[in-house]
Image (cartoon, grey):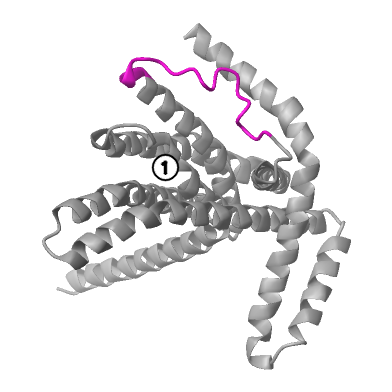
């Protein structure tokens, strides 16, 4: 009997450790996911365009295909690569994070410049206007393009997540990264699925609603969705510039170049002292985020010529060659 009691005590102890580990994984995954906000919001804003022009019955299958591709990007390719870096080359994580931050700044600034008419953005893609006659082939191309774009954003998300995990065991890091991958993928593409089906829901309510209020709500929903997508794009762009600028500023501080970070901190504290004490913390955060975003925009504008004239042509040449070979 005493042996059974001892066994039960051991099982209870193991259960407590397991529960604590689960709490650690969920807590760290939540913090890491929050840090990846810029890339996540932009992903949710960009993805609906990949189902534009397809029949309503094909929208969810396309999104599901992109979702599976995104999970494959994160779990099969990026998670093992991140764990190898963390184990054997942790020194490489900050530079990679800064590279990803520079990419976020470039993407955000390019969108701003495109709106202002200062950049062609992605509209100058050779063959962009060429569309295959077969809807299945077009669907294949759209899904593959979305998964390729997702790989870049997923790499940034996973790198940000990896940088936020405190030094711990190999398996805890793996569990946190896997949890981040699943949480973010489900959140992004679940939201995208809801967004792209809102039009259909509104149209159904407008045409088939028994009450006038229902039909009016349906019409309002149909009219509101384009505006909502524009707002999401604006918020996503701002978040990209904020997160990208913050990553670069903190990375420079780690490399011993802390002047910009110190100036932003001092300026934010100065702004916070101008408001009542009850809102000083929030004001300091908002001021810091704004200045990080302005810095990210300035850096991104400087990177636009490099991205458009050097990186993008090389990227397209490589993937166009692969597509032609296939």
Residue 175: in magenta span: no
Q: Nearer the viewer, residue 109 or 180?
A: 109
Q: Nearer the viewer, residue 175 or 8?
A: 175
Query: What's the residue at 21%, 60% (across, down)?
Result: 215
Q: Nearer the viewer, residue 134 or 37?
A: 134
Q: From this viewpoint, is residue 291 visible?
A: yes
Find the magenta span and give its range: 120-137
Most distant residue in the front direction:
212
Quadrant position of residue 238: bottom right
Horizontal arrangement in the rendering, residue 15 relative to residue 105 (left or right): left
- Mark 1, residues whose alpha carbon is within 10 Å: few (<14), some, or many (≥20)? some
SS class, disc 1: helix
Q: Which residue is mark 1?
A: 48
x and y, in percent, of residue 144 in the image: 44, 26
Residue 130: in magenta span: yes
Q: Is residue 47 above or below residue 205?
A: above
Query: What's the residue at 67%, 54% (across, down)?
Result: 241
Q: Is residue 173 above or below residue 64?
A: below
Horizontal arrangement in the rendering, residue 258 relative to residue 109 (left or right): right
């Amino acid at each position: 009997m005493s042996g059974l009691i001892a066994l039960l005590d051991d099982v209870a102890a193991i259960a407590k450790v397991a529960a604590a580990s689960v709490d650690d994984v969920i807590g760290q995954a939540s913090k890491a996911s929050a840090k990846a906000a810029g890339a996540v919001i932009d992903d949710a804003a960009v993805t609906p365009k990949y189902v534009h022009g397809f029949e309503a019955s094909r929208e969810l299958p396309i999104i599901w295909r992109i979702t599976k591709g995104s999970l494959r990007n994160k779990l099969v390719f990026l998670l093992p690569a991140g764990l190898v870096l963390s184990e054997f080359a942790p020194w490489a994580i900050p530079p990679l994070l800064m590279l990803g931050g520079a990419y976020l700044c470039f993407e955000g600034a390019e969108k701003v410049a495109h709106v202002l008419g200062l950049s062609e953005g992605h509209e100058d893609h050779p063959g962009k206007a060429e569309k295959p006659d077969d809807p299945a082939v077009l669907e294949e191309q759209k899904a593959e393009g979305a998964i390729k774009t997702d790989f870049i954003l997923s790499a940034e998300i996973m790198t940000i997540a990896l940088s936020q995990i405190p030094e711990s065991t190999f398996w805890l890091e793996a569990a946190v990264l896997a949890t981040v991958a699943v949480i973010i993928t489900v959140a992004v593409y679940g939201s995208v699925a809801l967004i792209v089906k809102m039009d259909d829901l509104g149209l159904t309510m407008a045409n088939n609603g028994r009450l006038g209020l229902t039909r009016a709500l349906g019409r309002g929903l149909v009219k509101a969705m384009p505006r909502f997508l524009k707002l999401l794009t604006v918020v996503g762009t701002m978040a990209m510039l904020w997160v990208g600028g913050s990553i670069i500023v903190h990375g420079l501080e780690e490399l011993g170049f802390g002047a910009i970070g110190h100036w932003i901190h001092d300026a934010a504290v100065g702004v916070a002292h101008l408001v009542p004490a009850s809102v000083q913390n929030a004001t300091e955060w908002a001021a810091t985020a704004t200045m990080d975003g302005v810095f990210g925009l300035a850096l991104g504008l400087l990177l636009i010529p490099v991205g458009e004239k050097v990186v993008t042509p090389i990227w397209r040449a490589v993937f166009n060659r692969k597509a032609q070979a296939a």
